[in-house]
Amino acid sequence: MSRRAPTPPAPKISDAEWTVMNVFWQRGTSTLAEVVKELEGRLHWKPRTVQSLIRRLADKGALAVEAVGREFRYSPAVAQDQCQHEESRSFLDRVFNGRLTPFVAGLMEREDVTQDDLAALREVLNQAEKKLKK
């Protein structure tokens, strides 16, 4: 039975860096100019700010860089779901001592929950139960 090598942990990403990474996860490969244009209507960041964030993300290994002619094209080097998982795990550990139940219970008490939300949560729980029985 062969084992896969463990996936290296995703880099720690700041709130501003999450904004930039979301653009890359949606668009895929992009240039600095394309990301600046994408964020233009939503944020009042200067192009230099976006450039600094992209450089930091590349330095952290979150973005891959490719020189194409006189410009650089960047693409995600880490999967969005991996970053979300690690950020969620870190949050649960810091705020809820790693416990999922108080987090979900507190959220459900204070947020509007739809029938669709409840159905999706039931399905997630059913799948988790099936995994436990294996």
Image (cartoon, helix red, strand yellow):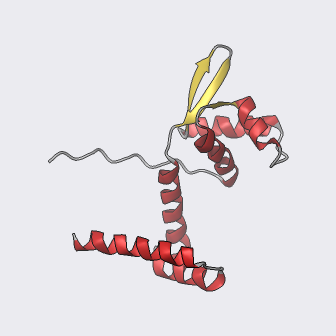
Could you say which is closer to the camera, residue 115 or residue 110? 115
Residue 129 on image: x %, y %: 32, 75
Residue at point 37% right, 47% down?
7
Residue at image x 59%, y 32%? 29
Residue 63 position within the rendered picture, expressed as x and y whole percent measured from the top left: 57, 36
Q: Nearer the viewer, residue 112 or 97?
A: 112
- Residue 99 visible in rendering: no
Q: Residue at x 66, y 37 (%)?
A: 54
Q: From the viewer's perspective, is residue 94 above or below residue 52?
A: below
For the point 54% across and 59% down, the residue is: 87
Question: Can residue 91 be seen at all in this image of the molecule?
Answer: yes
* Picture quadrant of residue 15: bottom right
Image coords of residue 115 (percent x, y): 56, 79
114 is higher (above) or lower (below) than 9: below
Q: Residue furthest left?
A: 1
Number of marks in picture:
0
- On-image quarter of the C terminus: bottom left
Residue sitting farthest toward the bottom: 109
Please identify the residue farthest to the top as the structure is shown: 69
Residue 97 image point, x, y percent: 48, 76
Up the image or down, 126 lies above or below 42; here it is below
| 87 up-or-down from 23: above or below | below
Relative side of 117 to 46, left or right: left
